[in-house]
Image (cartoon, rainbow, N blue to C red):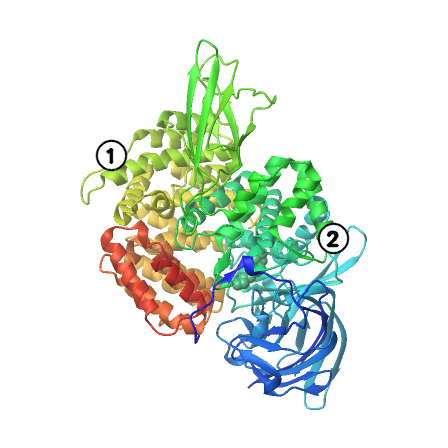
């Protein structure tokens, strides 16, 4: 980048000056170069009021423009201006045909944006601004065009040639080359364009839509992975049916294709009719895939499918509106996963991510509202805030409107805006119009960043039998937003009487949603004979931090009695957090700790109660993560958090050893693997028990883990046992198992990633040198984002105790990686920076070590916009 990166503001938005009616593309793929021939039918946009506007095309600086014509007339360099990414053409007629020939180099594209090669096959990633790395085009989401694409390549190497829509023509030429032409009848923004060329195999199935149309479903992968595609196909069909039943949305093309690629910057991409997936989000087979990955495949397949309506048919006007499609689509996929599995478990998992990672983001230097006002590099805004908080905001709309009106609102939104590029405001407006509810104050969620805090206190008036809840809200300042106005917060709550029964509230139910709209508000409940215990923020009805001075006994009471499953889990978390925070505050190395026995009592009761939902038992008995405890701390005491958590885990294991072993044995069944919710719950409970037991460092539990490993017929049990042994103090056994595992699975790239991750998050001393050694291993490939994530991100984000080593070695290591990756793959580089951006949360010594590395990155030479934005905001 030659100049200082430019900040793009939402307030500067203007409508495009020209429409692109049709886009005809021809790709000639060669080993040393690719030629892209484009023919665009262009006309003035009547909505643009400027006189004689220029046509602004985007084209990455690396594009080589070979030829440019308007209505057949060749333009010379003086007929247009090319400045950085922008190519401007003036003096244009009302409508015309623009033709261009561009030379690009997918074979050397390591950024994995635009057209690139993954393991010998060509594929694309255009969202958000990758299309400008392919050809000159008004690459902005509000320019929608009908595409016709011809792909031409050598037939033997690239027998499969795909693009969006339906294949309409094909042919061969004498020189061993062939071509296929695709037509997509739906106008789409350039970010949804896709192309694939490779030696691929596929599985095929079909789906009959609710109006009786038959859709061909094809999933493509390399031949060796053909046996790992069935689960994605099943998930796709389930998703198609669910979207018809739940949102009335039907698929629109005759074909739906998914392609699995190994080199991919994120999870997957919803290109119209041709989704491209990271192998990690589509391949699944019991032998090679863990339960967590099965669920991820199901969720991501559904997510990309749901985008066909929330994203593709109704798209974003500009990238500030990203949460319009992402928040809504995450909300939709969460609903799907809840219906396919367990609603409470899904909620618990989502909330844990939100509270741990999104809250941290909201409190950090990159904090932004779900509809940001400005950015330097849009790729930096594919965040937990846009996605997960965005989904929470849609969820709150649903809570405020109720099931039926929410559906009415979504129907209106899809009908009103079908084929348009719109804003989050259009979404809220449709919800308001359909429901008649006033969402004016609610809109603050879209433009105010930060996590609101609710301070709740209560009082009971015995004489009148009235109970009062006093709720105060505030939201901490975030960069650029010092003052916030009060949010409209739906606070779902219930009251329990002293016997643990739910009290009927004034709405006739036992759960009521309070509209918190003032900075301070009091809610009164009458007709009570004794002071109740409040159950607050049921189902996590709003993405806020809620403080209420629960006693530990009250939390145990809620764990046992609350009718809301989410709240029972939450009470267990709060109890564990409260007890652990006390130990963390008092922590001194080599000084004995004393565990509050109430945690043991509570856990024992959960283990001994018959008939509880296994998934919930395993969630309830999982201690809050180090990352969550860090998020909750004002100043993160890395060592105290690590050692306290370890101590508490060992205490639980010691005192509940018999119960844990009993549950382990009861759930260690020799039955055929199935990825259904009950079986997943059983395995997760079993493996949780094993994890507790192995923390006792006893030979017999090492053997139990070894025997589980040896007899496992699925990767879930095998991986769990391997991780436990690998992290245990039984060094020789760990070494043997790791070596054997690699030998057995070295041909399976995704299994090798598990092997890399397990070693990278090993908390034992010496982790950094093991990580550095792993990076020299033949299994590692520094160009492949999945490998980078499995080693570097796992070490920096899941191995706190080693990453935050007081000698600064972890920070230096990460900075070195960022400096290397900044050139090679800016998106990955910038994403990996996250742990260093959190420097304000640490002790002064660590702060200065972390900042020194941020400064080093900042001065390391020319930075990509991606890395520049994150580093400069972190140091601001
Ligand atoms: N829409 C894509 C994300 C694209 C990220 C570009 N840097 C995947 C998804 O959210 O479905
Ligand atoms: Zn998405």
Q: Is residue 758 left or right of residue 430?
A: left
In depth, the one of 274 and 366 nearer the eye is: 366
Residue 250: numbered disc: 2
Residue 701 against residue 377 in the figure, above or below: above
Q: Disc 1 designates what residue?
A: 594
The secondary element bearing badge 2 is classed as loop
Observer-side mark, 2 or 1, equals 2
Q: Ligand 1 lies in which image quarter?
A: bottom right
Respond yes or no on whether mark 2 lies under 8 Å from ligand 2: no
Q: Residue furthest right?
A: 212
Q: Residue furthest bottom?
A: 175
The image position of residue 233, as x and y in percent, is 65, 58
Asked if residue 810 can be seen in this view, the reply is no
Quarter of the image with the N terminus in it:
bottom left
Q: So how many labels did they put on this image?
A: 2
The secondary element bearing badge 1 is classed as loop
Q: Residue furthest left?
A: 590
Residue 602 against residue 850 in the figure, above or below: above
> How busy is the neighbourhood of tag 2: few (under 14 within 10 Å), some, or many (20 plus)?
many
x 38%, y 50%: residue: 705
Between discs 2 and 1, the one toward the N terminus = 2
Asked if residue 774 can be seen in this view, the reply is yes
Q: Residue furthest top?
A: 463
The image position of residue 747, as x and y in percent, is 48, 69
The image position of residue 862, as x and y in percent, is 39, 74
């Amino acid at each position: 980048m030659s100049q200082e990166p430019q900040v793009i503001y939402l307030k500067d938005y203007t409508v495009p000056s020209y429409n692109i009616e049709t886009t005809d593309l021809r790709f000639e793929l060669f080993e040393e170069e690719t030629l892209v021939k484009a023919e665009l039918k262009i006309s003035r946009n009547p909505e643009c009021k400027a006189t004689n506007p220029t046509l602004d095309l985007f084209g990455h600086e690396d594009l080589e423009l070979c030829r440019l014509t308007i209505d057949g007339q060749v333009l010379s360099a003086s007929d247009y201006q090319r400045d950085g990414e922008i190519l401007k053409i003036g003096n244009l007629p009302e409508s015309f045909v623009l033709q261009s020939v561009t030379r690009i180099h997918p074979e050397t594209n390591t950024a994995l944006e635009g057209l690139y090669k993954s393991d010998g096959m060509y594929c694309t990633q255009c969202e958000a601004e990758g299309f400008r790395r392919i050809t000159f085009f008004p690459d902005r989401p509000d320019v929608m065009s009908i595409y016709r694409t011809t792909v031409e390549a050598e037939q033997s190497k690239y027998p499969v040639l795909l693009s969006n829509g339906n294949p309409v023509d094909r042919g061969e030429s004498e020189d061993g080359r062939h071509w296929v032409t695709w037509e997509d009848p739906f106008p789409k923004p350039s970010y949804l364009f896709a192309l694939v060329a490779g030696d691929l195999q596929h599985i095929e199935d079909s789906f009959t839509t609710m109006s009786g149309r038959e859709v061909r479903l094809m999933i493509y992968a390399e031949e060796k992975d053909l046996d790992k595609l069935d689960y994605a196909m099943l998930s796709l069909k389930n998703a198609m049916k669910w979207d018809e039943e739940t949102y009335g949305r039907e698929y629109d093309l005759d074909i739906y294709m998914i392609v699995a690629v190994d080199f991919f910057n994120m999870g997957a991409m919803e290109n119209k009719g041709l989704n491209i997936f990271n192998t990690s989000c589509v391949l699944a087979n019991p032998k090679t895939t863990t339960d967590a990955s099965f669920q991820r495949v199901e969720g991501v397949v559904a997510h990309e499918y749901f985008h066909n309506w929330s994203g593709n048919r109704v798209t974003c006007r500009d990238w500030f509106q990203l949460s319009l499609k992402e928040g809504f689509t995450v909300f939709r996929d969460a609903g799907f996963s809840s219906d396919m599995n367990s609603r409470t478990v899904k909620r618990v998992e989502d909330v844990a991510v939100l509270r741990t990672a999104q809250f941290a983001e909201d409190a950090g230097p990159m904090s932004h509202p779900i509809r940001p006002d400005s950015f330097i590099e849009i790729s930096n805004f594919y965040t937990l805030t846009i996605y997960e908080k965005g989904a929470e905001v849609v969820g709150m709309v649903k809570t405020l409107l109720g099931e039926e009106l929410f559906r009415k609102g979504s129907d209106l939104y899809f009908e009103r805006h079908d084929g348009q590029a719109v804003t989050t405001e259009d979404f809220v407006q449709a919800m308001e119009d359909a429901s008649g509810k006033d969402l004016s104050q609610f809109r603050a969620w879209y433009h105010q960043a930060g996590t609101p805090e609710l301070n709740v206190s209560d009082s009971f008036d015995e004489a009148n039998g009235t109970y009062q809840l006093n709720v105060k809200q505030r939201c901490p300042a975030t960069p650029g937003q010092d003052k916030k106005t009060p949010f409209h917060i739906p606070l779902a709550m219930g009251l329990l009487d002293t016997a643990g029964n739910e009290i009927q509230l004034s709405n006739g139910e036992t759960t009521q949603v309070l509209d918190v709209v003032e900075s301070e508000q009091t809610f009164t409940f009458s007709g009570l004979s004794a002071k109740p215990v409040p159950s607050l923020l049921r189902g996590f009805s709003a993405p806020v931090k809620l403080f209420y001075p629960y006693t530990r006994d009250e939390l145990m009471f809620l764990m046992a009695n609350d009718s809301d499953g989410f709240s029972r889990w939450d009470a267990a978390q709060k109890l564990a957090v409260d007890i652990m925070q006390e130990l963390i505050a008092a922590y001194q190395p080599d000084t004995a700790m004393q565990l509050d026995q109430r945690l043991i009592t509570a856990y024992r009761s959960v283990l001994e109660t018959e008939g509880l939902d296994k998934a919930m038992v395993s969630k309830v008995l999982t201690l809050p993560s180090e990352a969550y405890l860090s998020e909750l701390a004002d100043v993160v005491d890395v060592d105290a958090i690590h050692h306290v958590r370890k101590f508490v885990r060992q205490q639980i294991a010691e005192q509940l050893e018999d119960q844990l072993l009993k549950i382990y044995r009861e759930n260690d069944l020799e039955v055929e693997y199935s990825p259904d919710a009950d079986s997943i719950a059983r395995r997760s409970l079993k493996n949780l028990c094993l994890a507790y037991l192995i923390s006792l460092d006893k030979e017999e539990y090492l053997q139990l883990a070894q025997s589980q490993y040896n007899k496992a017929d699925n990767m879930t049990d095998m991986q769990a046992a391997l991780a436990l042994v690998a992290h245990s103090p039984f060094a020789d056994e760990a070494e043997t198992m790791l070596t054997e595992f690699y030998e057995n699975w070295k041909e399976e790239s995704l299994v090798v990633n598990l092997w890399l991750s397990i070693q990278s998050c090993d908390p034992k001393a010496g982790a950094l040198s093991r990580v550095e050694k792993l990076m020299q291993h033949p299994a590692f490939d520094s160009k492949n984002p999945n490998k980078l994530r499995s080693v570097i991100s796992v070490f920096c984000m899941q191995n706190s105790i080693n990453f935050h080593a007081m000698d600064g070695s972890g920070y230096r290591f990460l900075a070195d990686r960022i400096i290397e990756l900044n050139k090679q793959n800016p998106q990955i580089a910038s994403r990996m920076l996250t742990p260093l951006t959190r420097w304000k949360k640490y002790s002064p010594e660590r702060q200065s070590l972390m900042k020194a590395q941020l400064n080093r990155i900042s001065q390391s030479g020319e930075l990509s916009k991606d890395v520049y934005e994150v580093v400069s905001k972190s140091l601001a």
